[in-house]
Image (spheres, grey):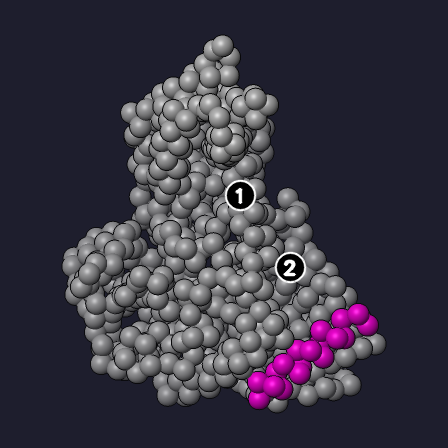
Amino acid sequence: MNLIYTAIGFFALAALLGMYLLTFVLRGKETPKAIVFSHGPLAVLGVVLLIIYIARGGPNPWESLVLFVLAALGGLYMVSRDLTGRPIPKALAVGHGLLAVGGFVLLLVFAFGN
Amino acid sequence: MKTQSFWEATTPQRPDYPTLEGNLQVDVAIIGGGITGITAAHQLARAGKRVAVLEARRVGGGTTGWSTGNLYVPVGPYFHNIASTRSQEVANTVAQARFSALNFIEEHTRKYSIDCHFARRPWYFFTQEEDMTSLVEKEAEALQQAGMPAEFVTQVPGLRYESVKRAVHMDGQARIHPLRYVLGLAGGVTQLGGQIYEHTTVLDLKEEEDHCLLRTTQGTVTCQQMIIATHIPIGIHTVQTVAAPYRSYVVAMRLKSGAYPDAYYWHNDKTHHAITTHSTDSMELDMLMIAGNHHKTGQASHQEYQHYFDELESYARQHFDVASVEFRWSAQHYRSGDGVPYIGLTHKGAKRTYIATGFYADGLVYGTVAGIQLADTIAGEGSAWLEAFDATRGTNLSTVGEFIKENTNVAAQYLKDIPAGQVSHFDDIGLGEGKTIEVDSEKLAVYRDAQSQLHICSAVCTHMKCIVNWNNAEKTWDCPCHGSRFMIDGSVIEGPAILNLERKSIDPTTGHLLHTGGKTSGEREINNPIT
């Protein structure tokens, strides 16, 4: 379970930075790139740990992984839009966040539900 | 001392070319009127193509008119390194291409009777340090293998340097007034039926299935092929991950003795200095130039950029009887990962869009090489240099370290964009100073002029959103990621950015940002000191 707890730590940090980034997107401001390039890698580390945990077999939070992967795809798309000067759709930013929150909740339930 | 190019100051008459107004259809559109674009235009027009050059400012007014006017076969990254990163065959091809380009320039100087002070002269490469001798020897051997007449010598004529440990000499190199040459060649372009437009900024470019479409400030250009001859291609291109922007500095001085050596020298000790001489109005040499101090654009190791000029002046005073410093200027160059420029189609899927970049600080000859090669390729004549300069080659095992180093550096620049400005208040910015500050969660590039008036722009580069840094020697905003540079009013000087920095306004009573609509244009400020 240590892998899951560490992943939860990375996801929690990523979530804090993500919420901060969302305030910029919703106000139509330029996102601070140091936060963008910290948020993404933290979340990726969490996903990698989750994949390793699932690959080991046994009961696993695969629903959580699916939501995180979908959120990651949305995140990559938003970064590509951001760096190439195209506005980030606010609905996409909120949807990305909701997917990640959903994945995070499912992960918490898996880790601490019983 | 204000920066000004010697070449700009000593070009008496500059023809005015019109601004493109309306739509145009040509065979080939060339973005950029420097030595690359004008050479390509000349060769294409000669081959019977309908060609149009679209220059955002003035012909030759970019890096060509801010170079050091030396024509030579040797290259800054060294041929022995190219032989190592690519192959000896590639090194030989590069040397032969540069040799041919040098001859091309001489031939066209004569053909159009261009008063550009072209004169053949020798090149010397020497060191006073024992541990640098092997580098000089390896380079001489690489040049010899490429068929160049490099030979070891024991003395370096024209200089009074003591204890020269190793020196190489090569005849047949040359000097030139680069701006006069390009303007003269541009005259040849129009004689051949080519069209040249100045103050015509390309704001958008697209390669379609059967044509290319360029949108300028006042019209559109439809063409079969386009060449992006803007030093680094404008817009976002994969080549920008392998071509890194650097700046170098030049100081031009008069000597008390009037004894100007007639040669081009590379003094290669712990620091590299290039020494050259040129003439103002006649063939008589009357100006000494020292060049060097390369650093990554927007990333000066000394916050005081004047340091770079002062160091060159100090070097000159140490070795020459300097009477006065007449000019100081700086120029940009792009370094490729393997030391060879990228010339050709912009990516593997491209069929109509050509680029030329990664010239290091050897751009007058490489620009000519690029112009010839691209024109030959487009005209269907083929080019023996195609493979060596292939712009789609990316990186290889021997250059992957350089690739990682440069791109890690770019990532590090992004990581500096944390939500906190350099200073917290406008009052902290002194007269003649520029700083990035943060107001209402926005990074601003703020300059206070001598009259205490603030000039405020967004500090977010319009290319790929790095935060620009202040260059206090040239009073410009320089992007540390991909080398875009902007005037204090935010208008683009050079680099891959197309759009100007967004201008901002502050409410003087509250200190908060006024809403400006978030729009920015690509129109160049005509009154900019850089033409």
Residue B411 is labelled as 1
- Please, which residue is most extreme toward the front here? A58
Q: Which residue carries the number 2 mark?
A: B293
Boundaries of the magenta span = B130-147
**Percent coordinates x, y for residue B242 in the rendering:** 49, 58
First in sequence, mark 1 or 2: give its number.
2
Q: Which residue is at the front of the view, B450 or B271?
A: B271
Residue located at (48% from left, 64% from top): B358
Q: In the shown orientation, is residue B450 left or right of residue B11?
A: right
Residue closest to the eye, B158 or B469: B469
Quarter of the image that includes the N terminus of chain A: top right
For residue B165, what is the image quadrant?
Answer: bottom right
What residue is shown at x 65% (from left), y 48% (from top)?
A: B301
Indicate whether B253 appears above or below B294: below
Residue B392: assigned label = none
State the residue at coordinates (43%, 62%).
B231
The amino acid on which the numbered mark 1 sits, given as a three-letter code, is Ala
- Quarter residue B371 falls in: bottom left
Badge 2: chain ID: B
Q: Position of residue A110 (x, y in %)?
A: 46, 17
In the rendered image, residue B132 lying in the magenta stretch gets the answer yes
